[in-house]
Amino acid sequence: MSSSNIHEDPEPLLKGDIEPDVPIRVVSPIKLAFVAFFLVSAGPFGTENTVKTGGPGLALLAFLTLPFLYAIPQCLMTAEMSTMMDQNGGYIIWVQRAFGDFGGWMNGYNNVFCNMIDISLYPVIFVEALSPYNFNLTTWELWLIKFGLILFVAAINIRGINMVAYALILFSVIIFVPFLVEFGMRVTHMRPKQWIYVPNSTYLSDHFGDFMSSVLWAYTGWDGLGSFAGEVKESSTTYPRGIALGLLLVTTAYVVPILVGLTVDPNITNWIGGAYYFVIADKISKWLGIAVTVAGMVSSAGKYNAAMMSASRAVWAMGNPPRKLPGIFGYSFSYYKTPLVAILFNSLTTSILCNFGFGLLIEVDTFLNCLTLLFEFGSFLFLKYKEPDTPRPFAVPGGKIGAWAITIPKVLIVGLTLAMAHVWTWCICLGLNLLFVWAYWLMLFAQGRLFSIKGKESKETKDNDNIQNPILSQNDDVIIN
């Protein structure tokens, strides 16, 4: 094994807390780009609803402008925070460092519940790919198919991030090929005037809330790239390069299928979310319909694979000091250095939640994600002022002014989305957050007997656990005796 100097007194990321198992840094810009593609998009499947609720004019406008107003600000923030704190856990440790125990607790639990709902969407979309073929599967048979996907993804994630990344690169080829072939076959049938159609104001007023939820859901997930920062090589260059390529892949995957679909069916009321791209492909060619069906199933498997990787590292971080979950959630499989218990936990919750309807899941998921984004951007701005001299290998251009410039548009979009949410979505998410507050005070009351959320006691827990591994810098190796 190669070795180099290990810092005698490493700079702690969380006031004295250290990472129990230091993973190997294997993520390159290419791997990060394809992980980003699957965390955010994995193809156009499920975005048909944007055309139905906003028309092709608003849908294309959103997919071409949101990268600048919504995605790029989130990408820049993620790149800066991930290189500033290049440790697994991402947004969990960002908010904890900025706002302390209570802010970290509320952000952590909102993220865990958001991730639980988010990853549960993909087995649902996976089986919806079969709906055009009328297999007449029973509810029990559909669940068995979903559970098979859950076991498959759990096995890949247990093997580690390298296995996940290679699988995602292969999956992306399967997804892009049929849509690029479609584009070549239908390019002469395209009519630009179809691209700018927007429904009347009455129709939009009834559907705009659903439209906003759908387009923002289609661009969420960038912050998940910070959850595995401890496994990224040369993060100061890997993050910006990988994110730029990933953003190009995402936008292409959304825009091209809409342009093709309008040549086949310009009637937006037919664009039913989840399965309509298969119908469009089948009208062009039977073999293309089969190819898009396979691509849709691979897309769901890949997105679930990437989301499981990110979400499990967030749960793992909450199981490590300063703990917000029992320590068992912070257990790592020593051979592969993967968050084994967190993967199994997320697999169990997915097997339950995947039985709920897609519409219910996506509304609550988008709302919780908006709340967590407010926490993350708040921590990003706060640390600009609280720790101005902390090294940031990649920093948002423009200093504090640049930080505000990328934050304000995103906060406005998030605020609009929250304002347009249904009343019952507000009630569910408010109820969850009241539960989180109650749990926080319960833990404060029980501290010393269950697990502590105070920094001082977290350090004592750390010492008692005899954690030996320091956080390593980008170029350090682990000396194994």
Image (cartoon, rainbow, N blue to C red):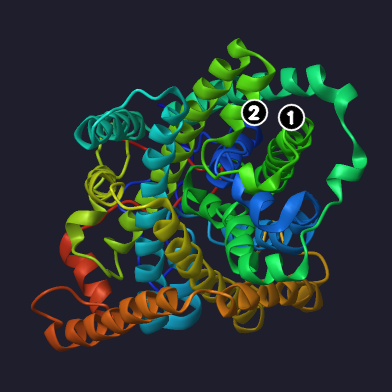
Q: Quadrant of residue 368?
A: bottom left
Asked if the residues shown at circle 1 and circle 2 are in contact, with their CB atoms under 8 angstroms apart, the answer is yes
| Relative depth, front residue between 303 and 25 | 303
As drawn, which residue projects farthest toward the left?
449
Q: Which mark is first along the chain, 2 or 1?
A: 1
- Name the residue tied to disc 2: 280
Q: Is residue 153 visible?
A: yes
Instruction: State left or right for residue 111 relative to residue 343.
Output: right
Query: Which residue is rendered at x = 73% and y = 43% of the image?
Result: 251
| Quadrant holding the C terminus | top left
Instruction: State left or right for residue 381 relative to residue 454.
Output: right
Residue 460, relative to residue 64: is it above or below? below
Amino acid type of the residue that numbered disc 1 sits on in the rendered structure = Val
Query: Which residue is rendered at x = 48% and y = 24% of the image?
Result: 167
Query: Which residue is rendered at x = 44% and y = 48% of the image?
Result: 310
Q: Is residue 2 visible?
A: no
Categorize mark 1 by other alpha carbons within 10 Å: few (<14), some (14-19), many (20+): some
Categorize mark 2 by other alpha carbons within 10 Å: few (<14), some (14-19), many (20+): many
Question: Mark 1 falls on what kind of element?
Answer: helix
Report x, y in % for residue 36.
59, 43
